[in-house]
Amino acid sequence: MSDKVDIHQQIDDVKQRVAKVLELASSLGTDGAEVALSRQQGLSVGTRLGEVENVEFTNDGALGITVYQNGRKGSASTADLSDDALKKTVEAAVNIAKYTSVDDCSGLADADRLAYTPKSLDLYHPKALTTDDAIELALACENHALAYDERLTNSDGATLACYEGFKVYGNSNGQLVGFPSSRHSLSCVMIASDGDDMQRDYAYTVNRNFDLLDTAKFVGQKAASETLSRLGSHKLSTCKTPVMFRADIANTIWGHFIAAISGGNLYRKSSFLIDALGEQIFPSFLNIEERPHIAGALASNAFDSEGVATQDRDIIKGGALETFLLTSYSARKLGMETTGHAGGIHNWIVSSQGGDFEAMLNKLGTGLLVTELMGQGVNVVNGDYSRGAAGFWVENGKIMYPVAEVTIAGNLQQMFKGIVAVGDDIDNKGSIRTGSIIIDEMQVAGN
């Protein structure tokens, strides 16, 4: 692994190379060009039942270039970063542009929206970890899980992964920026048996800073506990009932919302929220804020993949939709301005007022707690929602027994309006910081 001085020197060297690529593109008569180069190195170790299953070292990089010429666009990429390969890649992009259709909406992001001097967001925390150290941690995690209960008879293993790298982005508007980042994770997957019943579940921890990961013991025992809790699963009779999505599953609901307000679906008229800007689509107590500059957060970024500066913004305020999520291209197609969302969202924070997990169960009363979703039965065009699910049946705020092999169904428009509470049991392991959510009623198909 490189140290901080080394990686910043690498970034400076790559910036010079990117600048030369942009100069070459300009010399070939392009109207504009943008270049992104990323490099990553890391170590991943997997163990299963006390044995080392795999040890993988990663050290790779790639450069991608997009050129614009008379309204036409051409892109090419290469993993070979030699001068000759870079020259051929630029020439290939220019040649491809000759054969593409003219599109007045294509082109670089507007120069006045770019992040020319982005601030550091503390995203780089390399860890000097030997292979032996990594194996020891993965083995410890799995061993803690296996020792938790005699019904844990098998394992799909534990995995420790540590990665670090950097990205450099430049364009012919004079932007040339880069930053280093790291990401570390530890996961464990267990299998429990009780008679003919066999269940599988997992737990994981992830952070940019290795020292902030949950311990191997915590992850192993969490995986064990989650797996054991699923033994003795029941099916349900078909019914309509309130549904609570546990915090680590609730982000999927927000993910469907993201798809519905993303520019690509909007200009293609493939979303049930095409005309929803300014409309009340959630209950008035619900707010969603985007905070791209949280130090050390997993989804922090000072600029998007087009170089556009990210900024704090309200997504939902008082239940109403404040903004779409637009790239430069989709914004031009819609006659709007980019929101800096090329490449995805940046740290969403969903407001909470429902109390902790136990308080949310009390609010649910009697209904279905969902802890796993399966399948992809979601139609963003009309909002129809249908997915396989597993979890627990709850009565009077108490978990009664595990549930499996059911399908939950509804329509996202009604589901959004039917949210009655968002919990304080925030899950921070992704780009959406949300607690559990309760929806007043959904169709549950079982026996």
Image (spheres, rainbow, N blue to C red):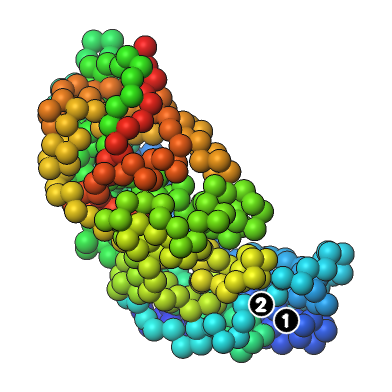
* Picture residue at 83% right of the left edge, 64% below the top: 100
Report if residue 163 is visible in the image. Answer: no
Left or right, residue 54 beside residue 200: right
Q: 422 or 10: which is nearer to us?
A: 422
Question: Which image quadrant: the N terminus?
Answer: bottom left
Earlier in the chain: of badge 1 and badge 2, it is 1
- Across and down, in percent, residue 201 comes to 30, 32
- Residue tagged by mark 1? 32
342 or 95, which is in the foreground?
A: 342
Residue beneath the point at 26% across and 44% down: 420
User: What element does badge 1 sit on?
Assistant: strand
Label of residue 48 in the image: none
Q: Is residue 79 visible?
A: yes
What is the tally of numbered marks visible in this picture? 2
**Residue at the spot 37% in from the left edge and 12% down from the top edge:** 447
Which of the 4 quarters of the picture holds residue 398? top left
| Residue hosting label 2 | 108
Q: Quadrant of residue 92?
A: bottom right
Q: Residues within 10 Å of mark 1 (few under 14, many from 20)?
A: some
Q: Measured from the top left, where is residue 102 in percent x and y?
A: 83, 68
Q: CA distance from mark 1 to mark 2?
A: 7 Å
> Three-letter amino acid code at disc 1?
Gly
Task: State yes or no: discs 1 and 2 in contact (Cβ < 8 Å).
Answer: yes
Q: Secondary structure at mark 2?
A: loop
Is residue 286 toward the left or the right of residue 43 in the image? left
Q: Name the residue: 28% across, 10% down.
A: 196
10 Å crowding of disc 2: few (<14), some (14-19), many (20+): many
Residue 283 spot, x, y in % from top left: 32, 51
